[in-house]
Image (tube, rainbow, N blue to C red):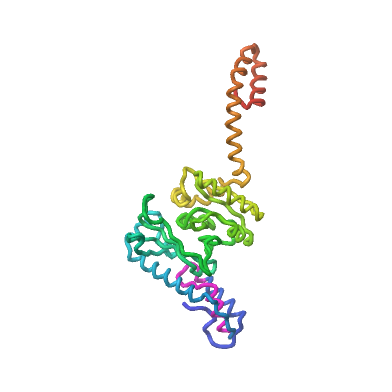
Amino acid sequence: MGPKNISGKGERNVGSDCFAFIQWMSEHDGTDHKISWREAVEILAKRAGIPMETDQYDKAYQLLHKIAMKRHEALSDDNEALEYLWSRGLTDETIVKWKLGVTQKNEFGHDIKRISFPLLTKYDRVVGQSCRAIKWEHDSKFPKYWNSSNSEIFHKRSYLYGMHNYDSNFPELRITEGTMDVITADQFGVMNPVCSLGTAFTREHAMIIKNMGVSVCFCMDGDEAGLKGMRRAVDILKEFGVYAKVFIIPDNMDLAEFSLKMKEKTEEYIQEHSMMCWEFELQAAMKTFSSQLTALRAKAMPDIINASKCITSQEDKILMKSFVKEKFGIEL
């Protein structure tokens, strides 16, 4: 089935073509027959006889797209790579949606096979690749990930993986740690998961979020490094007038592991258990206060017990229990 009202004969105008074309794109949403917004504009401009300025980086985009598609096609014939992705809980539908691929080359004297993650812009243009080694240990002599170098079309410090999948009907970004976290969370219905690429949250990221006018929820595990990174990111966002929420993933799981555990309930759980940034920032103070208060209560207990020995009536006993609970926070 082709586009409606575009390839027919007779007089036309750009408005009707645009309306019909958008109709066609909407009807094909979710299928393989889907094109980018720029391609849509190019077709409409050609119909209307309007010359379009050529993007100076078009050749680079086209080359990177071909590389990504070649790696994606190679994945269907690579059982080892597919088994790895299936073992991580990804479905075939998810693999196709995110155009995951496989690449292999010699690194540091080793033949390394990696899963490739195309880096897409919000206009679905490929600007680079992030590649994860399938077989990697902490003592491996090669990096777990490698990412495309900065270029005229790709800037690592301002890139958020997953942004091309942003749904404006839910104006909040869920910022997590890695590409697999983003993809797995998306598979189970988490709204707008994104991540940076092996770099800390930057002011460039904050500026993009500020300009988008969206809110943010950080979804990170609760280890020391994760908490430190979240505090720094929250402080950066505050400089731009953006106040974030925080969801600390329980049991030291990452978001991918947590999504596989909770499945379709992941989004609901995040919404119910995220906290405001001020609550997150007060956690350390609350722990210190609580520990000191516990020590003070323990110090006061001998006096409280000794004072209770002089109680002779039930009325005094009730009054003392109320007093101790109010003043010391201790239940007798």
Up-down relation of residue 181 to residue 313 (above or below): below
Instruction: Tell me where residue 241 appears, x and y as whole percent.
Output: 66, 54
Reply above or below: 163 against 293: below
Figure quadrant of residue 91: bottom left
Of 261 and 140, the residue lying toward us: 140
Direction from residue 241 to residue 198 in the image, left or right: left
**Picture residue at 47% right of the left edge, 57% below the top:** 179
- Residue 291 location, x and y as percent? 57, 31
Say if residue 78 shows up in the picture: yes
**Quick one: quadrant of the C terminus?**
top right
Determine whether 249 is above or below 50 in the image: above
Outermost front residue: 108
Q: Indicate yes or no whether the magenta region holds residue 36.
A: yes
Report the label total: 0
Residue for point 63% across, 59% down: 210
Q: Which region shows up in magenta?
A: 27-48
In percent of width and height, residue 326 lies at 66, 26
Quarter-of-image position of residue 289: top right
In the depicted view, which residue is nearer to us: 199 or 78? 199
Q: Is residue 81 visible?
A: no
Residue in the foreground of this view, choosing between 256 and 121: 121
Is residue 307 highlighted in magenta?
no
57 on left or right of 133: right
Residue 126: percent from the left, percent from the top?
Answer: 48, 69
